[in-house]
Image (cartoon, rainbow, N blue to C red):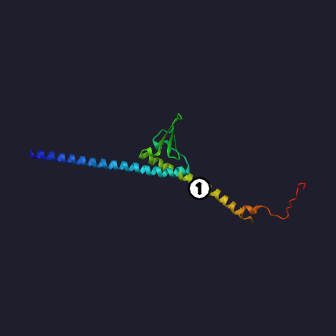
Amino acid sequence: MAAEDNVSDDRLASAVKAMEDLVEEAVQLYELDKEKVNVIDDLYNSLKVITTYLSFSVDLHPKLLNLPEDHRIVLTPSLDLLIIRPNFKSETKRFDQLSLDETSNVLKYAIPAIISMTRTDREIKNKKVSFLREGAKKLKRLPASSPDDLIINDSSVHVENLGGT
């Protein structure tokens, strides 16, 4: 009977060890979930500053959120996801409320799209600023350097007294 007790003790010890392992895994998973929330909050807050400044909206493919093809999704500058159903009813979902997979999918798609829109906007603004800079350079060639000096002081212009006195 001592052999049976020994086998039973081994099984109990194995069961206790398995429970300890389960607790350890659960604690690590809990800590990862907490870290995930903090990382997503940091990401959301930082990204929102940039997207709000840029003011671009991005159309997203419905499969990024595991939705049917007949849905339309727009990522707004405030990082809200506007989901429009086929019946034209809509709902809003905050970016920081997405699952990890959805968050990754949206970022993989939206970030390159926003970069492309930003580059295009920068190129357009750069051309406009260059045009204005060139115009300002041309205007600086005028002999007068202040607005007061722009008053015509041509001695050949005579102003006659048109009044009767």
Q: Quadrant of residue 147?
A: bottom right
Residue 3 drawn at (x, y percent): 11, 46
Residue 160 drawn at (x, y percent): 88, 59
Q: Residue furthest top?
A: 87
Classify the position of the N terminus by image quarter.
top left
Instruction: Classify mark 1: helix, strand or loop.
Output: helix
- Residue at coordinates 46% horizontally, 42% vertically from top-left? 65
- Relative horizontal placement of residue 57, taking residue 36 as reference (left or right): right
- Residue at coordinates 47% horizontally, 45% vertically from top-left? 95
- Residue at coordinates 64% horizontally, 58% vertically from top-left? 129
- Residue at coordinates 19% horizontally, 48% vertically from top-left? 13
Few, some or many C-alpha atoms within 10 Å of disc 1 (few <14, some 14-19, many ≥20)?
Answer: few
Residue type pointed to by label 1: Arg
User: Would residue 113 be visible to someone looking at this image?
Assistant: no
Task: Please name whichever residue, 11 or 138, is drawn nearer the observer in this view of the structure.
Answer: 138
Q: Residue furthest front?
A: 165
Q: Which residue is mark 1?
A: 122
